[in-house]
Amino acid sequence: MLRKILIANRGEIAVRVIRACAEMGIRSVAIYSEADRHSLHVKKADEAYSLGSDPLAGYLNVHTIVNLAVATGCDAIHPGYGFLSENPELAAACARRGLTFIGPSAEVIARMGDKTEARQAMIRAGVPVTPGSDGNLANLDEALACAERVGYPVMLKATSGGGGRGIRRCDDAEALRHNYQRVISEATKAFGRAEVFMEKCVVNPRHIEVQVLADHHGHCVHLFERDCSIQRRNQKLIEIAPSPQLDEAERQYVGGLAVLAARAVGYTNAGTVEFLQDRDGRFYFMEMNTRIQVEHTITETITGVDLVEEQIRIAAGLPLRFAQHEIQRRGFAIQFRVNAEDPKNNFLPSFGRISRYYAPGGPGVRTDGAIYTGYTVPPYYDSMLAKVIVWALSWDDVINRGDRALRDTGLFGVRTTIPFYQEILRHPEFRAGRFNTSFVESHPELLEYSTKRRREDVAAALAAAIAAHAGL
């Protein structure tokens, strides 16, 4: 078993890995920029080391991180998600320095990070993909010809894209001409590569992803699916496990596709295979995320499997502790990404000092976060403050519990997406389990919620302000 792990990340996911290390008797090492000096992951780790004053450079410097891991006696690095988590250079550098990378090999990360190569791998494996270009597009003329062949609307995508960036929908040739150079520019700025490819646009699909685990002994399993259809501009907001929109036959089919995809590329560790499901119920491979996902929590909640612990065990060379037929699911779980954003102001980021915070509790409620009363949310990183996860036996009950948990959450000093999520929970189509990726855009009335605070919320905010003024 591994003895000491450096977490090459920050915030909530770093805290999550630190907790897993503590339960496994493994020492944890945190890294931080000056902007993160007072972050919770720094306080909770066994050791913490500064990366310097630049808020981003240190988290993205492979050599600094690997050298620090070696200097502090670590035998492994956990990349979390974001930053370097899907950068094959980090995995390769770990291998060169004798460190264990808690994730797949550099070769697999590179292969699945290249969207056109991933498509070709899936085609060879017999996993369905949407019609599109055979590889990267050479120029606008080739893009126009491809669009005529597959039929509009089409999606232009950055080959190295991710996180909803470098993607444009084109409904006709004029839109394609307008967006072609824009996507190339976005791809170059965000990912350092100008390559783009094209896929047929699946109109208003469901976004279904499947969690997989694969060890170094030839075992590979899925842990059922998550429905990530509630999103805005390709950014996930609310995730659900399992999907209330799939029947058992669809569930087993898409789970089998995910295992087939993972085996086809020699995958090891935790990963997620993402699919689009069209109106006729057909599934199409979209991409594979070669890391732990933000929404791994809901899979843990319905299966009882600690995915971070399994990541560490697999990286240490241990076999999976369960076969596919031994993995059981129970009930439904929903995760809400509590973001420091103002939905009424076009989701403008709302950074600043948290004057008062208390997390929800009670049966079936979990909160993963890295914030506390008095914490100043820095403007340099993702706007997610915390994740509220709820579980219940039935779909109706988990919605009601989610609404209660969001009402119980006290978070003052910055605007958040909580009231917007409450509106979604109350919407009849969501409650009926009928939604797709166009849900948020199709219901602008969701933004018409009242900003009037409850009396107890106002009292709590006033008390916090008085206490801060008095220096208490």
Image: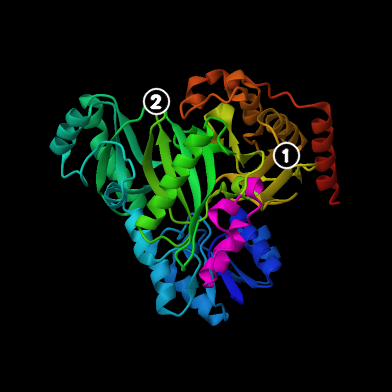
Give the tally of numbered discs: 2
Looking at numbered disc 1 in the image, what kind of residue is underneath it? Answer: Phe
Instruction: Residue 160 in the image: state x and y as whole percent.
Output: 33, 51
Residue drawn 81% across the image and 47% down it: 468
282 relative to 161, above or below: above
Is residue 38 visible in the rendered structure shown here? no
Quarter assignment of residue 419? top right
Q: Is residue 453 left or right of residue 158?
A: right
Question: Pointer 2: residues within 10 angstroms few (<14), some, or many (20+)?
Answer: few
Residue drawn 18% across the image and 36% down it: 143
Quarter assignment of residue 165? top left
Looking at numbered disc 2 in the image, what kind of residue is underneath it? Answer: Asp
Residue on which disc 1 sits: 412
The reply to whether the C-beta atoms of the residues labelled 2 and 1 are less than 8 Å apart is no
Residue drawn 54% across the image and 81% down it: 71
Instruction: Residue 222 in the image: state x and y as whole percent.
Output: 51, 51
Residue on which disc 2 sits: 280
Compare residues 267 and 13 and report the one nearer the observer. 267
Residue drawn 57% across the image and 68% down it: 313
Compare residues 126 and 56 and report the one nearer the observer. 126
The stretch in magenta equals 301-327
Is residue 394 visible in the rendered structure shown here? yes
